[in-house]
Image (cartoon, rainbow, N blue to C red):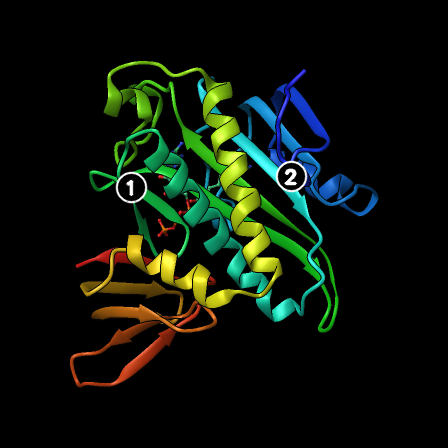
């Protein structure tokens, strides 16, 4: 039994020793579940990121997805990934680890990825059925079980941490920032996000339509990245099928 002190997130927790993907499971049950139901697994066989990219999920990490049903216009759902990012950064901060956000959904420590966030939802033009917030956080995972561009808390701190302690801090932070999102206090969310994000940096934006370089200055009120191209034009990059690389 996992005991948490949050009111909404994790009021029901479904735990698996092993599963395909907590996001996929969450999507299968989301319509029947109440907001806050959380799925967590020791191991994911088919953990994934965006565009079905493989997400390494061996024992020792937190692989979890929470079902959210916010009563907001669907255009705000893009901000859920920012809720996740700020919550993870603050949870890591509480553990004494300084992390930075790589727009839009990656959390880095010492330039390496320690956590990925994946929000996937079902909604129409005017109504949200659900949004799944998936978080994968490398805790007691050995380096050789991860891709080379990844890191874990164990690698950073040199010790293993009780997964449950990290989970409780994380879910508390998620509940706090989800509350801010639901109250539509978007400025508070984005300001906090900005203070941890890697901005004012030269970036390369890759998409199926091509690629371009520029300087990433900020995000707008919808979470789009504002990139100034070499000819001085401000491009808005929307979180979707684009990848960002630091140039
Ligand atoms: P992009 O790399 O295109 O900017 P992204 O960072 O959002 O996008 P995804 O497209 O969702 O990443 O794909 C997942 C990426 O995360 C893969 O490139 C993979 O190398 C990396 N990865 C996989 N498992 C882990 C893990 N456990 N920890 C850190 N990184 C991982
Ligand atoms: C990213 O690519 O950066 C996002 C990775 C998200 C991984 C998490 S682990 C829990 C949940 N289940 C999945 O299959 N993906 C997310």
Left or right: 160 in relation to 136: left
Q: Position of residue 77 (x, y in %)?
A: 59, 62
Within the image, what quadrant is residue 64 found in? top right
Q: Nearer the viewer, residue 50 or 122?
A: 122
Which residue in the structure is indicated by mark 1? 99
The residue carrying pointer 1 sits among few (fewer than 14), some (14 to 19) or many (20 or more) residues within 10 Å by Cα, namely: many
Q: Is residue 13 above or below residue 28?
A: above
Which residue in the structure is indicated by mark 2? 9
Q: Nearer the viewer, residue 40 or 163?
A: 163
Q: Is residue 232 above or below residue 184?
A: below
Left or right: 61 in relation to 180: left
| SS at circle 1 | loop
Left or right: 154 in relation to 200: right
Within the image, what quadrant is residue 61 found in? top left
Q: Quadrant of the N terminus?
A: top right
Q: Which residue is found at the position 32% from the left and 25% from the top?
A: 153
| SS at circle 2 | loop
Q: Position of residue 50 (x, y in %)?
A: 48, 49
Question: For the residue with label 1, is its CB less than 8 Å from the closest atom of ligand 1?
Answer: no
Q: Quadrant of the C terminus?
A: bottom left
Q: Which residue is found at the position 29% from the left and 14% from the top?
A: 159
Q: Position of residue 38 (x, y in %)?
A: 66, 34
């Amino acid at each position: 039994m996992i005991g948490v002190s949050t009111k909404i997130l994790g009021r029901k927790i479904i735990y698996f020793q092993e599963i395909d993907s907590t996001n996929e499971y969450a999507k299968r049950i989301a319509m029947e579940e109440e907001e806050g139901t959380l799925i967590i697994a020791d191991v994911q066989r088919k953990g994934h990121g965006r565009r079905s990219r493989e997400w390494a999920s061996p024992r020792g990490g937190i692989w979890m997805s929470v079902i959210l049903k916010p009563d907001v216009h669907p255009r705000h759902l893009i901000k859920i990934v920012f809720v996740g990012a700020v919550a993870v950064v603050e949870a890591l901060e509480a553990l004494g680890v300084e992390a930075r956000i790589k727009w839009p959904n990656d959390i880095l420590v010492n330039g390496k990825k320690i956590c990925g966030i994946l929000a996937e939802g079902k909604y129409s033009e005017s109504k949200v059925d659900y949004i799944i917030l998936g978080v994968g956080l490398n805790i007691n995972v050995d380096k050789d079980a991860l891709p080379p561009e990844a890191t874990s808390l164990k690698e950073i701190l040199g010790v293993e941490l009780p997964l449950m302690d990290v989970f409780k801090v994380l879910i508390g932070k998620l509940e706090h920032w989800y509350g801010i999102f639901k109250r539509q206090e978007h400025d508070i969310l984005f300001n906090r996000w900005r203070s941890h994000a890697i901005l004012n940096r030269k970036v390369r934006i890759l998409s199926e339509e091509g690629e371009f370089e520029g300087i990433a200055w900020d995000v707008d009120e919808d979470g789009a990245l504002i990139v100034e191209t070499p000819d001085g034009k401000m491009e808005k990059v929307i979180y979707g099928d684009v990848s960002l690389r630091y140039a």
